[in-house]
Amino acid sequence: MNTKKLRVKTAVLIFSVFLSACNGFISETEDYTDSGDGASENSDDTVSDTSAENTADHDESSDYTWSSSEIVSIALNGSSFSTSSSNVSVSGSTATIKKAGTYSLSGTLSNGQIFVDTDDEEIVRLILNNANISSSTGAAIYIENSEKTMIVLAENTNNSLSDGTTHNDDESNAALFSKSDLTIYGDGSLTVKGNYNDGIASKDGLIIASGTITVTAVDDGIRGKDYLVVKNGNITINAGDDGMKSDNDSDSSLGYISFDNGSFNITATGDAITAQTDVLISYGEFKLTAGGGSSKTVASTASAKGIKAAVCVTIDDGVFTINSADDAIHSNDYLVINLGTFSIASGDDGIHADNSLGINGGKIDITKSYEGIESAEISITGGDIQLVASDDGLNVASGVDGSGMGGWGGYSSSGNYYLYMDGGYIYINATGDGVDVNGSVVMTDGTIIVDGPTSSGNGALDYDGTFKISGGYILALGSSGMAMAPSTSSTQYSILVNLSSSKTAGTLIHLQDGSGNEVFTFSPAKTYQSVAFSSPVLTKGKSYELYTSGSYSGGSKNNGLCTGGTYSSGTQYTSFTISSIVTSLGSSGSSNPGH
């Protein structure tokens, strides 16, 4: 099992409650300041921690070993079978396996079925050895009853299963259908066409241990009702509804999906990956397209998310390319990202959790979203985050979001909601508010850079409570109508400058101290009229000079921030001396720019 983990810092967001399924993310609540702001400790929430709550798994090492002398051969001859075993009964084009054991299937069955029905307490293994099975009236392989069944894909073989558009029985709903625990394993390939409903479905647990599997289905691609556990494999799915799914809604320890490793290319009209409880990812390479991609709009009653869990999403590592009409990564409760590389384009939110969201590391690039990262409580302790949003970049509010672009779905505009930043780097290019917190912000470390709104109805920084900064770096540019700086209750110094007129995109803004030492030089991506800045370099009693225009030679530029070069030929806009926690220069449309 690949259990790549990241040890994360101990300081995190103020979380009032945390669900047991994500046990370990927040361990306790303690006072952060004398004013009553809370901050909680963050322990190592990884897939191993979370999966301890999801203990159901039918896998045993003995499942993967057998003797060649035990193998019973079944030859598929068009519409008939050849076998010498009394454990297999043949009736027309149906072969029924009545005893536990290991069976090898080879050849082509053009319109028939393999049916498993045994009360034995041992495993049934079906070795597909260049087997091609199709049925016009039901599942190609139907497992009615067994302790558990393993589909073995023999090495260097190509196998296929398909069903008809109608099924004569009342229960089977997939080309490969099992009413008991099912495992797929081997170094061969399997192509499945689910013409009736699902491609592969188990009404108990489903484990994919290995194999190259390609599924096309009119409904769900691969479904394990109790759980879907992927240890490895190369999986391609094209589904008319959800791609990979677990949906047991009657047991809180079931209905989960876990990935240890593997490669996944999933195209789904609905959700690419969806679980009734948790989605747990140790590692994997994922290319997910949901609902036709970010350029499409889905109905408010539909769901077309890349990764979705009703309880918890935990990602330890992986490579993710997600293009979704709805949220790219979504949890109805809690979401944790510890590491990984993410390329995200979303028609709604890039990353969303209804209750709490933690990012402890990784490289996250959200190239398109309505709101970039959204939750009632957001904690960032590490990572490199780049995001583009047509509305808010970081949005902290409570409620359940809508499914399509622009859906609010009942968010509250004020309340006890928090953004906590204790590390990491985030660049925000937002049409709406850059950082919008319907509550308070606690920042102790990290970097926030905002190319914010041009409309006076939005601000680069917008919060309802307080913004207490004691460490870290903020440079936020945008319109002046709603401009805000961190709160006066902070312990780190900040400035807020509202310019007398707007400056066009690319017009440099430069701050230096009275001795001419560069504090920052920034080349904004959009028109701006305000700048909020906070950094440990700001010092009480020290004088500073602010310039606009000019040029920058040498050095480098990252997200507009120029470093390592020389600024020249600018026009001095103002000079000032730091005398208070927040130094405000110019007028602002906000009645309380620094609280």
Image (cartoon, rainbow, N blue to C red):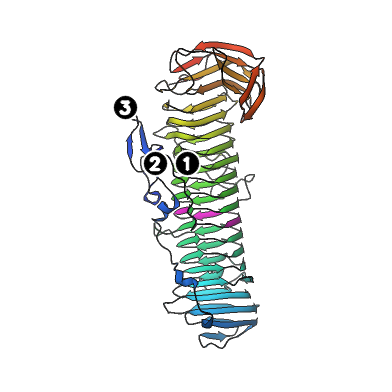
Q: Position of residue 314 (x, y in %)?
A: 47, 49
Mark drawn on residue 34: 3
- Callout 1 amino acid: Asn
Q: Amino acid at mark 2?
A: Asn
Give x and y (percent) for residue 103: 54, 79
Per the rendered image, the range of residues in magenta is: 259-279
Label 1 – label 3 distance at C-alpha = 27 Å
**Depth order, front residue of 77/124:** 124
Q: Which residue is mark 1?
A: 360
Closer to the camera, 197 or 222? Answer: 222
Q: Marks 2 and 1: CB-CB under 8 Å? A: yes
Mark earlier in primary sequence (2, 1)? 2
Dot 1 crowding, Cα within 10 Å, few <14, some 14–19, many 20+? many
Q: Is residue 92 visible?
A: yes
The label number, if any, that marks residue 463 in the structure image: none
Q: Identify the secondary structure beneath mark 3.
A: loop
Distance from label 3 to label 2 (Cα)?
A: 21 Å
Q: Quadrant of the C terminus?
A: top left
Helix, strand or loop under label 1: loop
- The residue sitting at 44% across, 44% down in the picture is 7
What SS does tag 2 mark? Answer: loop
Please name the residue that numbered disc 2 is placed on: 42
Amino acid tagged 3: Asp
Q: Could one spot residue 392 in this view of the protein? A: no
Residue 302: image location, x then y, percent: 55, 50
Q: Are marks 3 and 2 in contact (CB under 8 Å)?
A: no
Q: Is residue 126 left or right of residue 557?
A: left
Q: 273 above or below 407?
A: below
